[in-house]
Image (tube, rainbow, N blue to C red):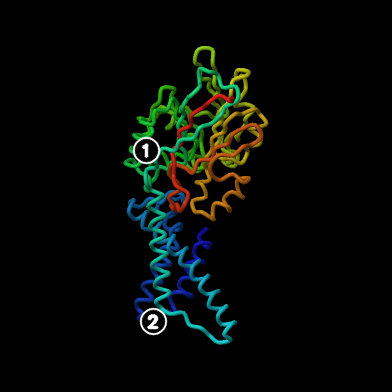
Amino acid sequence: MLLTFMLPGLIVILNWLLPLALPFGVKVAIGLGVMIVSYYYFWSRLSSGSVFAPEFPRLIVILFNWLLAAVLFLALFQLVLDVGVLGLDLVRWRLVSLPDTVREVVALFALLLSAVGVMNAIKVPAVKDVRVTIAGLPPQFEGYRLLQLTDLHISRLFPASWAKAVVARANTAGANLIVVTGDFIDGSVVMRQADTAPLEALHAPDGVLAVAGNHEYFFDYNDWMQRLSQLGITMLLNTHTVLARGEGKLVVAGVTDLSASAHGQEGPDITAALQNSPAGAPVILLDHQPRMAATAADHGVALQLSGHTHGGMIVGLDRLVARGNNGFVSGRYRVGGMTLYVSNGTGLWPGFALRLGCPPEMTRFTLTAET
């Protein structure tokens, strides 16, 4: 990962910075700054022992994300300019120099674009409404509303104040049930004790149900399962719960994350999750990653809620993220007879906090019977 982000820094220094008509000392200062920013993940590992948990003051984490994204954009824009200049060289059959003003404008645009992306990433998202048709939905559950939060990534970037604001908005969304589809945190229980405390206030008439995401396995998984349970969150780890209204029943099941077995934990088992569930009751499945949606559909799941992809974060990049998730990256999909919804995420990893065209969300689903 470090080498991956060093390369854009070198492109910026060699292709953008060196040709500029600036004093040598200024070039050295800018070059050092670019390399310091490019080493963000190295500094993160030094700060906490994990590249996933930068333990710096929030403002520093925001600055790192802003400047790192600016370096990446500037490297990309500079490569495009280089190709354009090379094309002119070949057409005119002479060397064409790129004016400093063009380089400066491109740098300012990269800084502005990355600033917009970071601000979009760290805001408290609005509630997004989605209506879902469920075959065989009992009439007692017509109009039932559940709210999905996912990929909170509570951390130095998304601290207690942000979590408190998310909880306040979720609690006023009028949902019958709140579900969280994993990646609650980045950091150990000790690191995030205070930052996760606002989650205890999360409430809905039918409770708060959740599954673990892959990031929970990076940081003391068993401790986190205990901590989240203490906060009043019911973890559905290859199991289910039955919601009943009179004679009507609705099953909400959850599976562990695909990364679990790599960390010595029980992997996802939808058969176990649905064992002894009431026959004929529609099933809503919580699965952090959307990759196994076809398997869920084969097991008769009516609605699967997932996250993990962060919606691809940037328009264009979302196509690459989709390829790593069986084509699922953002929004509603039809998989066999099942509806899959992949949330863009409420927060995202503080190592690359950027959103352009893929806004964060907390999603309020209204269930309706198939007509």
* Outermost residue to the bottom: 94
Q: Position of residue 46 (x, y in %)?
A: 42, 55
Q: Position of residue 9 (x, y in %)?
A: 47, 67
* Outermost residue to the front: 371
Secondary element at tag 1:
helix
Q: Nearer the viewer, residue 180 or 172?
A: 172
For disc 1, the marked residue is: 166
Alpha-carbon neighbours of circle 2 within 10 Å: few (<14), some, or many (≥20)?
few
Q: Position of residue 15 (x, y in %)?
A: 48, 75
From the viewer's perspective, is residue 371 above or below residue 364?
A: above
Q: Amino acid at mark 2?
A: Ala
Q: Residue at x 43, y 49 (%)?
A: 53
Q: Is residue 312 left or right of residue 325?
A: left
From the viewer's perspective, is residue 63 above or below residue 197?
A: below
Q: Is residue 297 visible?
A: yes
What numbered label is drawn on residue 21?
2
Q: Are marks 1 and 2 in contact (CB under 8 Å)?
A: no
Q: Amino acid at mark 1?
A: Val
Q: What separation in Å lies between label 1 and label 2 (alpha carbons)?
A: 48 Å
Alpha-carbon neighbours of circle 1 within 10 Å: few (<14), some, or many (≥20)?
many
